[in-house]
Structures are given as structure tokens and as C-alpha cells.
Amino acid sequence: MAPNSDSQTTEQSLETLQDIKRMMERSSRFISLSGLSGVSTGACAIIGAFIAHRWIGEYLSNAGEGRDTFETKMLGLAIGVMAAALLTSTWFTWRKARKSQLPIWGHASKKLAINIAIPLAAGGFFALGLLQHGGWNFIAPACLVFYGLALVNASKYTLTDIRYLGFLEIALGCINMYFPHEGLYFWTTGFGLLHIIYGLIMWWKYERS
């Protein structure tokens, strides 16, 4: 009977350690980030890119629209796409957190927000500087690089898989620097297609069950 007793004790100890590990992970990492948030963000980006492509075509065809009007429209579109992506991704994340009975705004999520906001804020100011000096062609690569840096910086406070998405965004932005006139296609690939692929992988890996 002694060997069986020792085996049961070992199994109970392992289960206890696994429970402790899960509790520590929940307290130090924001694990309620939903894969469907990535899918919704990507969908918003692709819709926005489609609209932007049409507007750019109309502007280049000399339809009579002034440059200031065109730039205002594009800026408004970017803000609208960002707002839609934030709203939909937040809703999917809130739904996952509620199912998992985890708080959506706790210590881990605050750390995540801070670490993702710093590179994004720097990237925003950098992009505004490019706009002021007429560097429209480099807005897309700048957004991709700074967004990728934000994901890598925040990966230690959420699912580590997001780091690989960050690396891909950075690489895509760096390549885009050498093809500045193709920025819309790189932007669509990075913020649209990669987000959808990443979101589906995360959903399949963590949420399918």
C-alpha cells in the first residue's frame, strides 16, 4: 500500500503546484484577451483600407477635391477605424473575461495598458511629425513598427503568443520603408490579414473548447 500512497501524494502535489501556477499566471498576466478581438480588429482594418483605396483613387483622378479636404477625410477614417477596432475588441475581451470569471480591469490589465500605450503614444507623435513635414508615404511603416514594438513590450503581461505578432508587424514595417508607395497594402496586411490569422490561431488554441 505504501507505493500507491506515495504515488497519490505525488499526484496531489503536482496538482497543487499546477493550481498555484495558474493562480500566479492569472494575477500577473491578462489572459482574457480574446482571439476574436484580433479577428474583429483585422476586419475593421480591411474595411477601412477598402474605403481608403477608393478615396485615394478618386483623389488621384483629379475629381476636384482639395488636398486639405482629402487629408481631413483620411484622418477621420483612421480615427473611425481605430474606434471601431477598440470597441469590438473590448467587447470580445469583456465577454471572455466574464465567462472566465476574471476582472477585465485589474493589476495585470493596467500593466498591459501602460506598456502598450507608451510605444503607441511615441508612434502617434512620430506619425504627426511625418504628417507635418509631408511624409505621408512613411506613415504606414511607422505605424507598423511602433505597433509591433508595443505588442512586444506588452507581451510579458498577457499571452506570450502576441510577441510573434509584434515581430511580424515590425518586420513588415521595415520592409515597407523600402516600398513607401505601397503603404496601404502593407498596412492592410499588417493590421488586417495578420490580425485575423493571429486571432483565429488564438481562438483555436485557447478558446475553442
Image (cartoon, rainbow, N blue to C red):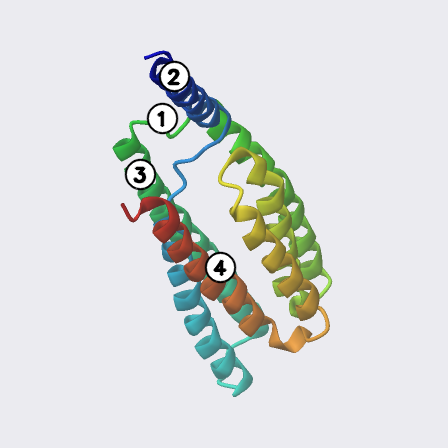
Q: Are marks 1 and 3 in contact (CB under 8 Å)?
A: no
Per the rendering, the mark at residue 78 is 4
Gap in Å between the C-alphas at discs 1 and 4?
Answer: 30 Å
Which residue carries the number 1 mark? 103
Q: Are marks 1 and 2 in contact (CB under 8 Å)?
A: no
Residue 96 screen position, x and y as percent:
31, 38
Residue 91 screen position, x and y as percent:
32, 43
Which residue carries the number 2 mark? 3
Of the two numbered discs 1 and 4 in the rendering, the one whose residue sits closer to the viewer: 1
Secondary structure under the numbered disc 2 in the rendered image: helix
Of the two numbered discs 2 and 4 in the rendering, the one whose residue sits closer to the viewer: 2
Of the two numbered discs 2 and 3 in the rendering, the one whose residue sits closer to the viewer: 2
Per the rendering, the mark at residue 96 is 3
Q: Are marks 4 and 3 in contact (CB under 8 Å)?
A: no
Residue 139 screen position, x and y as percent:
64, 63
Image quarter of residue 32: top left
Gap in Å between the C-alphas at discs 1 and 3?
Answer: 10 Å
Q: Residue at x 30, y 32 (%)?
A: 100
Q: Are marks 2 and 3 in contact (CB under 8 Å)?
A: no
Per the rendering, the mark at residue 180 is none
Of the two numbered discs 4 and 3 in the rendering, the one whose residue sits closer to the viewer: 3
Secondary structure under the numbered disc 3 in the rendered image: helix
N-terminal of the two: label 1 or label 3?
3
Q: Residue at x 54, y 29 (%)?
A: 111
Q: Are marks 1 and 4 in contact (CB under 8 Å)?
A: no
**In-front residue for pair 58/181:** 181
Of the two numbered discs 1 and 2 in the rendering, the one whose residue sits closer to the viewer: 2
Secondary structure under the numbered disc 1 in the rendered image: loop
Residue type of the residue flagged with mark 2 = Pro
Image quarter of residue 10: top left
Residue at the front extreme of this rendering: 1
